[in-house]
Image: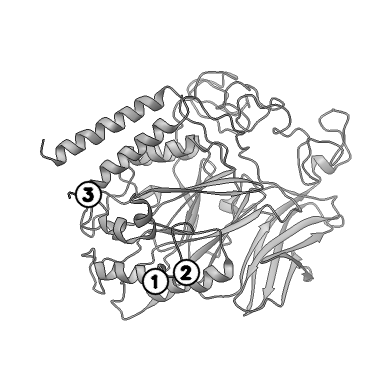
Amino acid sequence: MERSNPQIRTILAVAATLLALPLFPSSSPAVNPNGARHSSDPNQLFWFIQVGDSHVGENFDGGTQDSEYLNWLVTEARTVVNPAFIALNGDLTDSTNGGLIPNGPHQAEWNEYKGLVDPSVNATNFFDAAGNHDQYNDGSLSYYLNNSIQGRATQATQQTWIRTFAFGKYAFVNVSTPGDDGASWPFDHAGLRAAELAFMESYFGSNMDSKLLFIFGHHPSNDFNYGKTEFLNDLKKYRVAVYAYGHTHSYNEGRSDQVFHLNVASLGKSSGNHYNLVAVDNNGVSIVAHNAKDWPAVLITTPVDRNLGGSNPYAYPLSKNSTSNALRAIVFDKNPVTSVSYKIDSGGLVAMSQVAPGVWQASWDSTGVAVGQHTLTVQAVGSATRSDAVTFDLKVTACDDGLDNDGDGKTDYPADPKCYGESDDSEGNCDYGTDADLDGSSVSCDCNDTNPYVSPNHLEITGNGVDDDCNPNTPDEGGGDGGCAAEPVPEAQASPVLFISSDSVPHRPVMSASRFGSGTAGGLWPVGALFMVALAFRLARRKRGA
């Protein structure tokens, strides 16, 4: 029996997804993209591991780092850290079979890969994407489809998954960035085709009720040969929190249009920063790079670092007038953790308490501390002594200053219901009141509550004559900021990704963001689906020689 073409299966899957979508955008509440909050609640917290480039089969120099570290990841690290999932961002195998030149694919490498991962992980907790080494001389990615965890489970090169907690839903997607031409080394024609982008866009549109959206791939967007502009536009349009990837074998972080681009080093080939530990704490996203086998692993999750990329647009301040600012970190070690402590700036260490497995917390009285930027350091003692540090702002916040800033007759937290806590720096939060257009911004702040593409949570899109961010002072080059309007927003013009740190720079990458997605107008989904079916039919005819 002739095997079906994976390209045709992918296109038909996209068509089925499009047809399954509602004709109109979901009525589920949309997320506020500035939804990261300082909170004393440790129960709105989860974490996962991002890793890349295992390169199983790379032993030209006689080393075993590829197999040794992958085995450590899926056994010891998974057991100790207990992540919500592990995302492996491509180059699962080396395609050299122990040689110098990637001339594969080699089934022996894939057999070794399966032997390492199959006993410990499965398709519900391990999301392995394809990389360029996995597609050399294999344009259909048949070896990936027949041997990887996700390939065998889905028979597709792109996957999606959801994690739902009592405090909300979070959406994730693997995109397949390797070229589909089966080029031989050293050629690498990375990018995303129209059908691959359509798959991603349909997923965004059907998950508007997610708190945050994460995307995993193999290549940095700057390496795309095709689909780059469309991809970056989609990241901006749908308010993606993080695009995480591998490929470069070095740690880098950057941002474009408030979307964070996170590059993990190589598990199988790099000398350090082998994996990223990522946490979501009250919708604040924190990230730190760690070396394989080094314990304990320490990550501060509250507060989030204000210095991501020089300035984290989603960082929140701590209240100068609070006697109980919550400080929180997650700590993991294969051996018992004997103590976890914190200090502010150069002060002395103060003990933290364990409030849940792996979660440590303290309450800090900041009333005697000057306003301004401060450094929080958390030190853990276990197998060794290791620490993490973040920078935060301390200020007199609007919800803890003794004033009725919004004139509603209610002053500060908890008397003013528009204050979510003492650290809230606005008594007029945009999630207070009705939200008719479901864009995460209520009528109290939204200058056009009938247009989901217009609110203070949106970036200003230049040249469209629309006040996208509800700020008439924001420049709108080419047309003037014409105030709120109900017309649809055209494609966003994405900015280039600017990288601001690498392996040569000491780093403590932490980011905070939220995700808003809006489906395409309902009437276009059936048209798109019919187009996909027609394209699949055309490919099938070509395959048969018709």
285 shown above or below 438: below
SS for dot 3 = loop
The three-letter code of the residue at mark 3 reads Asp
> Residue at the spot x=35%, y=40% of the render?
13
Crowd rating for badge 2 (residues with CA inside 10 Å; few <14, some 14–19, many 20+): some
> Residue at the spot x=49%, y=67% of the render?
273
Expressed as whole percent of the image width and height from the top left, the position of residue 71 reads 43, 73
The three-letter code of the residue at mark 2 reads Val
Question: Which numbered dot is residue 408?
Answer: none
Q: In the picture, which quadrant includes the C terminus?
A: top left
Question: Which quadrant of the view contains residue 401?
Answer: top right
Question: Which quadrant of the view contains residue 192?
Answer: top left
> Residue at the spot x=58%, y=75% of the render?
295
For the residue pair 28 and 345, the one nearer the viewer reads as 28
332 shown above or below 364: below
Expressed as whole percent of the image width and height from the top left, the position of residue 42 reads 72, 56
**Residue under circle 1?**
116
For the residue pair 285 and 335, the one nearer the viewer reads as 335
* Residue sitting at the far left: 545
SS for dot 2 = helix
Question: Which numbered dot is residue 181?
Answer: 3
Q: Say whether marks 3 and 1 touch (CB < 8 Å).
A: no
Give the color scheme: rainbow, by chain, secondary structure or one colour.
Answer: one colour
**Residue under circle 2?**
74
Tell me the CA gap for discs 2 and 1.
Answer: 8 Å
Q: How many numbered discs?
A: 3
Mark earlier in primary sequence (2, 3): 2
Question: Which quadrant of the view contains residue 119?
Answer: bottom left
Tell me the CA gap for discs 3 and 1.
Answer: 29 Å
Left or right: residue 53 versus residue 212 is left
